[in-house]
Image (tube, rainbow, N blue to C red):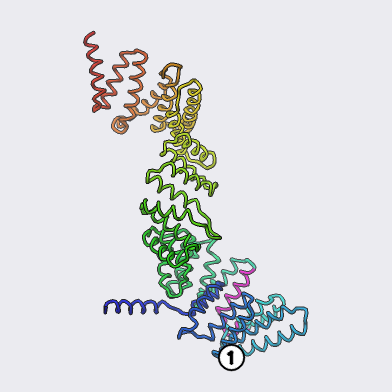
Amino acid sequence: MKFKLFLSLILCASLTCMAQGYKDGIEYYKVGQYDNAKELLLRNLDDASTDKAEAYFYLGCIGLYTENYEEAEKYFDAGIAANPEYGYNYVGMGELELRRASLKAGDKDAVKNAEKAAKKLFDEGKDLCGKKDDAVMVAIARAYYNVDPVKYADEIEDAKKDAKKRDKQSADLYVFEGDILADKEQWGSAAGWYEMVMRSGKDNIEAYVKYANTYFYVDPATAIQTLESLVAAKPNSALAQRELAEKYYKNDQWTKAAEKYGVYMQNPNHFKQDESRYAGLLFYGKRYQESYDLAAKIIAEHAPGDIEVFYMKRMQLYNLVAMERWNEADALAKDFLSMTVPAGAKYEPKDYSDYAIVLNALGDTDGSVEMYKKAYEANPEKVELLKEISSACSDAKDYENAAKFFQMYVDSADYKTNDLVILARRYNNWAVTMVDSTAADSTARQEVFQKALDYATMVDEKVPGNIAVNSLIARICMGKECGFDGRHYAMDGSAMPAYDKLLALLDADPKNLEEYPDEYINIYRYKAVYAYVTKDNESMKLYYQKWLEMDPTNEGLRKYVETLTKDDQKK
């Protein structure tokens, strides 16, 4: 019991150290994440450490940005009531006056009166904040800018000048200048202002995050380095932790993203909706059991038809497949793929292809093929799935479709040379297993063999002298040779040039006798059987003997060779 109490105290202490309370909400507000900001400000509003006047000011500002003016006024009034000496709520009320005036643009007197009221409120806020507060002047400049940057250009400029007088290196002013340029999509110039804040050494998380966001799609490494520096300087900032984890995620650095999200998830100011993202990151970070368990926790916290349940069942399926827990994955996939799909969600190709892997592992090759086909239907642009369908068809001994789907892949993609080798093998397998009982069958079979030979020959032209490719060519030629003649399968020696070429390639290096014994066996077998068919007894004995030398444990062959020797002795 004492030990549990000790752990509880340690945990509470560590979470307290991580907590920034309502200040995390302010940071989210400053980078334009208003919904997140509002959630954290309200979550921490009644905490003893919260400066309610400041918290209400930012809640009021969110009301302004969302044009919920009644709510904005409510929060600014609450801020003034909490601390009448906190000047920023008067600035907020001043912006509210300007915004309401802009709605009455046709009533000049009303606009003029509102502008006077706004200026009076700005002056009151400025006086309360004191002559050294540069940030309040930037807040006033922003208020004018938010309402009409053209109409109030002079007022904005005056407020900016006053801010600079109060602090020549005003961080808030630099950020505001950057924001103005960002609004004009002058990203490089905007980043320059944010960088000035960073170089000044001012404590301004907003500048770091905006700089990183501006640069990420141009130079992700620089953006990530910036956020790494920020997290090192501000390890308790929920915003900094989350932004770094997100950048790792967007840059496909799954392991690092999962690690940083894990740290962020320990922050009391993490968002519930981020748990789903973390479950995904744990999966991509190959922490499968942790991901599965977190998904189970999220499912238990939501109603059965909730979209989060849909996403987390998907995540559980992916994890079970990765852990090769086939029976559990089979049961879960059946449940997941029979769900009523929530609005805004849909099944993804991987949902079907993962289930195809499960079915194949459980021996249901036909079911596996069907799932791969569904995966392809869900996203026909994902041509790599055609290879998976082909492979599944091959496992199911459906060699015709195995060849046809791989042909579709080669026709649709920037294929590699090895893909042509696979396609040649697919056609060869199909041809070998075709029923060949009529002349028409034979013609069809020869056409398929010819396709196999065409693709294998293409590869030989691209990479001449490859033993594996020439072995495939020889086998295809042998298949073509053994065609239907109306009575039986015949050999006419048309594959001999291919086997002679393969033998020459092998003989070029004595090491090949040890490295490729099966190739030698196939060559000598073909030559021996052909010699038998053509009644070339000397060649027959020679190649049967060579075959036996390469295949000494083949007792049936040994006995046959001994019979040939005895026949010679009798003669």
For the question of whether residue 202 can be seen, the reply is no
The spot of residue 237 in percent (x, y) is 46, 75
Q: According to the image, label 1 marks what residue?
A: 128
**Main SS, magenta residues:** helix
Describe residue 197's horizontal placement relative to residue 433 as left or right. Answer: right
Q: Nearer the viewer, residue 184 or 526?
A: 526
The spot of residue 256 in percent (x, y) is 41, 62
* Quadrant location, the C terminus: top left
Name the image quarter holding residue 106.
bottom right
Residue 122 inside the magenta-drawn segment: no
Q: Residues within 10 Å of mark 1 (few under 14, many from 20)?
A: some
| Amino acid type at mark 1 | Leu
Q: Residue drawn 36% across and 60% down? A: 289
Name the image quarter holding residue 319.
bottom left
Question: In this picture, is 326 found above or below 104?
Answer: above
Residues in magenta, as a range: 162-183
Q: Nearer the viewer, residue 39 or 567?
A: 39
Question: In this picture, is 458 found above or below 324?
Answer: above
* Quadrant location, the N terminus: bottom left
